[in-house]
Amino acid sequence: MILISSLFLLAVPFLSTESAASELESYSYSPCTRLSTPKVPGAEVLSITGVEKRNYTVTAVPQLLPTPIFGLNFCEVDVVLTHPKAGDRVLVKVWLPLQHWNGRFQATGGSGYAAGNFDASLGPAVQLGYSSASTDAGVSVNPLSPAKWALRQDGTVNWDALTNFAHRSIHDMGIVGQDITAQFYGIKPQFSYWNGCSTGGRQAMAAAQRYPEIFDGILAGAPAINWATYVVAEQWPQVVMEEEGTFPSPCELKFFTTMAIEQCDELDGVMDGVITDPDICNFDPYRLVGNRFNGPFSSSGESLWYGLNVGAALDSLANTNATNGRRTGLPLFVNDNWIKYWLAKNPNYNTSSISYETLYGLFDQSKREYDAIIGTDNPDLSEFHNVGGKLIVWHGLADQLIFPKGSIDYWERVERLMGGSFKVDEFFRLFLAPGVDHCAGGTTIGAVPNDILKSLVNWVEEKKAPDTVPATLSNTPNGNKIERILCPYPRTSRYIGGDTTSAASFKCV
């Protein structure tokens, strides 16, 4: 859940007209040290500090920013705020380009248990001319663990911190970022965008549902939409291994993925190592070992949530650890910590002791206690539609952490609820990327979307809805790049003949 691809972050923005570009160049900037305290509804600003930074280097961050960024010149503004009776201290950091501001503001999302990635997200945005903001939500900046903020000293849930992490910080960051941008450049940003993947994708959905008036365009990658449900579902393979007393090794799990791809690769007419449509892949793991992973089921056989798609890597959720020749389960930090801190409310809780029956109860508890605060699966986007907002969700079909069928389920529920009154694709489009893993985290074999932020900007500013999104398959055996297109769901890309490395050989059907 902590992966963000460079292609996702480095989407190339553009000005809508040449006149707008020349007009922006004429604006003079205010000194960093002379900015006024922004007004944030529901919060009190404790401090504001600004400093000018020149020739700044953003260092590479594993799984977030693959290559460093050099030579950035910007004004860095730190705004610290608090909420009444919460006793919190929330940092909102805003970076403002000293040259070539493109007239836009971009709020950036976080990863794992961090609400913001700061330099790793701000750097790429500023490099492309955006004023940009990131926040710690008043919680730890550690994406791997919520240990410092999940529980109060008396062992009860820190509801204020969870509220900040879940959604309140999204509102605060948007308001602060837009205010500081307007002060610094002497004009409000012409357009405001949200850009995030994974946790940042969940935050994107919260922005559309809870704060529809803040952002003109929202880009949500691999969103953790049904947090309270899917996080518990991630524990399912660990429970299965414990209950059955069988712990497959990573190479055994990889074998299943490899065999599935081998069987279903050419169903789309192209041999490229990618399963274009997992739903038509009839790969049967039963013939290999005797069990099929379809996601968690209740004791009565009812499906509790989705499983991974055929062709996705299995060794993240079904991860194991070998010690002295004995293999044991090694759960993903996201579900492991959610169960410990928010469900058991005990950091020392042994998640390896969870039985099938225990897990069924955890599903109910998680939804009952937390869906109202962190859930982002409300299909009613009418307010976002009414203010003219545009939403693009994209999800890799080989996502090994967040089940892509959750995004499909959400789109279909929006269509069922709103399709009678609106044409949903006029404001919300879902793009599925075959063969792409979580946030295109570096080892993906599928076609990763290119310039998808540009597609969103085009839609918002030029009213050009994205009928396709260009994508590139880079990890090929010979190292050559293969061009593809992604299609808005429920359409999918189909090979129509010709050069299999060219996007022109595919169309949406």
Image (cartoon, rainbow, N blue to C red):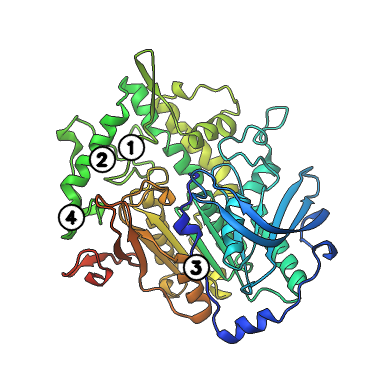
Dot 4: element: loop
Please report the residue visible at 50 percent of the width from the left and 46 percent of the height from the top.
Answer: 227
Does the CB distance between marks 3 and 2 fall below 8 Å? no
Dot 1: element: loop
Density class for disc 4 (Cα within 10 Å; few <14, some 14-19, many ≥20) is some
Q: Quadrant of residue 317?
A: top left
Indicate the amino acid at tag 2: Thr
**Viewer-side residue, 102 vs 69:** 69
Does the CB distance between marks 3 and 4 fall below 8 Å? no
Q: Which mark is residue 257?
A: 2
Residue bearing mark 3:
12
CA distance separating discs 3 and 2? 34 Å
Whole-percent x, y for residue 188 in the image: 70, 75
Please report the residue visible at 64 percent of the width from the left and 42 percent of the height from the top.
Answer: 141
Mark nearest the camera among 1 and 3 is: 3
Whole-percent x, y for residue 449 in the image: 39, 61
Whole-percent x, y for residue 324 in the image: 38, 12
Indicate the amino acid at tag 3: Val
Density class for disc 2 (Cα within 10 Å; few <14, some 14-19, many ≥20) is some
Indicate the amino acid at tag 4: Met
Which of pointers 3 and 2 lies earlier in the amino acid sequence? 3
Residue bearing mark 1:
314
**Viewer-side residue, 445 vs 188:** 445
Mark nearest the camera among 2 and 4 is: 4
Which of pointers 2 and 4 lies earlier in the amino acid sequence? 2
Dot 3: element: loop
Whole-percent x, y for residue 202 in the image: 52, 52
Which of pointers 1 and 3 lies earlier in the amino acid sequence? 3
Residue bearing mark 4:
271
Density class for disc 3 (Cα within 10 Å; few <14, some 14-19, many ≥20) is some
Does the CB distance between marks 1 and 2 fall below 8 Å? yes
Indicate the amino acid at tag 1: Leu
